[in-house]
Amino acid sequence: MDIKIHSIHFDADQKLLDYINDKVSKLSLFFDHIIAGEVFLRLDKSSDKENKITEIKILIPGKELFAKKQCKSFEEAADLVVEALRKQVVKHKEKV
């Protein structure tokens, strides 16, 4: 699976990139035919603590799955997004 990570309006450190790459690649354990994944990391301009947004879009044959979460840290948001996508992938696999 090809994974592209985009950090918007900031530079993500290598540790964060590795963490997200590792999490997203685990989705292939649930469904072998994932073509690519695209991750967007954003900082929200709001002043509250939950200003980190993680969006992940994955391409599978005939469909595109998407999830978005906003949390205090990118790691926490990535965990929640990957879990949401895992549920979508499992649901799609059952349909196929």
Image (tube, grey):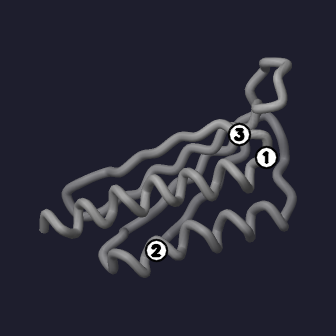
Determine the secondary structure under disc 1: loop
- Determine whether label 2 and label 3 are within 8 Å by CB: no
Instruction: Give residue 91's position: percent from left, percent from top.
Output: 25, 60
Instruction: Give residue 61's position: percent from left, percent from top.
Output: 23, 64
Q: Earlier in the sequence, mark 2 or mark 1?
A: 2
**Residue mark closest to the camera, 2 vs 1:** 1
Q: Residues within 10 Å of mark 2 (few under 14, many from 20)?
A: some
Q: Which mark is residue 71?
A: 3
Residue appearing at x 36%, y 51% in the figure? 65
- Determine whether label 3 and label 1 are within 8 Å by CB: yes
Give the distance between the C-alpha atoms of the residues marked 2 and 3, in whole angstroms.
Answer: 26 Å
Residue appearing at x 53%, y 40% in the figure? 68
Q: Residues within 10 Å of mark 1 (few under 14, many from 20)?
A: some
Q: Nearer the viewer, residue 93 or 40?
A: 93
Q: Is residue 72 above or below residue 92?
A: above
The residue wearing badge 2 is 1
Q: Earlier in the sequence, mark 2 or mark 3?
A: 2
- Determine whether label 2 and label 1 are within 8 Å by CB: no
Give the distance between the C-alpha atoms of the residues marked 2 and 1, in whole angstroms.
Answer: 25 Å
Q: Is 34 left, or right, of 37 in this rendering?
A: left
**Residue mark closest to the camera, 2 vs 3:** 3
Q: Is 11 left, or right, of 76 in this rendering?
A: right
The residue wearing badge 1 is 73
Q: Is residue 42 above or below residue 81?
A: above
Q: Nearer the viewer, residue 96 or 1?
A: 96
Q: Nearer the viewer, residue 80 or 52?
A: 80
Question: Of the residues shown, which amino acid type is indicated by label 3?
Answer: Cys
Give the distance between the C-alpha atoms of the residues marked 3 and 1, in whole angstroms.
Answer: 6 Å
Determine the secondary structure under disc 2: loop
Q: Is 12 left, or right, of 25 in this rendering?
A: right
Question: Of the residues shown, which amino acid type is indicated by label 1?
Answer: Ser
